[in-house]
Image (cartoon, grey):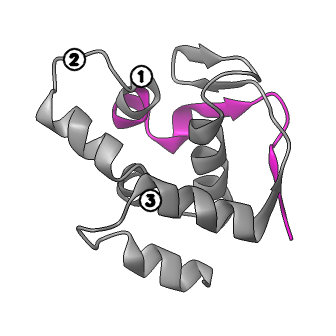
């Protein structure tokens, strides 16, 4: 799938997080990295699905809303439970946007 095809697919209600990860694995070589998402720190051994998504979004120049849509059903779960604590990286992204994301080393390189 092309990046354009992927971004068009994001608005489909049936889009799933697994599809986002499959697209990333198809398009990029990944190396784990620690990262900060707003005030939330993630080590290089935790939340690496979020790390992949956030890095891909930055690389492709996605909007904050498109990036949230990449999380698919997990983003919908956060919207359904606005006062909850699950999915901290999605909640942090909703507060600070991609401008709040910093990587120890950028984790993706294009294939």
Mark 2 crowd level (few <14, some 14–19, many ≥20, 10 Å Cα): few
Measure the C-alpha gap from mark 1 to mark 3: 19 Å
Image quarter of residue 95: top left
Q: Which of marks 3 and 2 is nearer the N terminus?
A: 3
Q: Residue at x 79, y 31 (%)?
A: 33
Q: Where is residue 32 in the image (x, y as percent from the top left)?
A: 81, 35
Instruction: For marks 2 and 1, give the CA distance.
Output: 9 Å
SS of the residue at dot 3? loop
Task: Judge by depth and name the residue closer to the eye, 19 or 35.
Answer: 19
In the picture, the disc for residue 63 is 3
Left or right, 53 with reference to 85: right
Q: Residue at left 13%, top 35%?
A: 80
Q: Which residue is drawn at 38% across and 69% down?
A: 10
- Disc 3 versus disc 2: distance between alpha carbons? 24 Å
Q: Which of 106 and 80 is in front in this view?
A: 80
Is 106 included in the stretch rendered in magenta? yes
Which quarter of the image is occupied by the C terminus? bottom right
- Mark 1 vs mark 3: which is more N-terminal? 3
Q: Position of residue 78 (x, y in %)?
A: 24, 33
Q: In this view, does 4 lie above or below 12?
A: below
Q: Would residue 94 be counted in the magenta stretch? A: yes
Q: Name the residue under label 2.
A: 84
Mark 3, other Cα within 10 Å: few <14 / some 14–19 / many ≥20: few
x and y percentages locating residue 24 in the rendered image = 66, 61
Above or below, 61 against 42 in this view is below
- Mark 1 residue element: helix
Q: Which mark is in front, 1 or 3?
A: 1
> Where are the magenta residues, as a range?
92-111
Is residue 58 rendered to the left or right of residue 20?
right
At numbered mark 2, what does the secondary structure look like: helix, strand or loop? Answer: loop
Residue tagged 1: 88
């Amino acid at each position: 799938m092309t990046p354009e095809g992927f971004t068009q697919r994001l608005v489909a209600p049936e889009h799933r997080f697994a599809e986002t990860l499959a697209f990333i694995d198809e398009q990029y070589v990944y190396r784990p990295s620690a990262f900060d998402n707003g005030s939330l720190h993630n080590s290089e051994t935790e939340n690496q699905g979020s790390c992949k998504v956030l890095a891909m979004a930055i690389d492709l120049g996605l909007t904050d809303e498109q990036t949230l849509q990449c999380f698919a059903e997990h983003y919908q779960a956060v919207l359904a439970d606005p006062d909850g604590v699950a999915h901290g990286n999605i909640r942090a992204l909703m507060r600070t946007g991609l401008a709040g994301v910093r990587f120890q080393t950028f984790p993706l390189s294009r294939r």
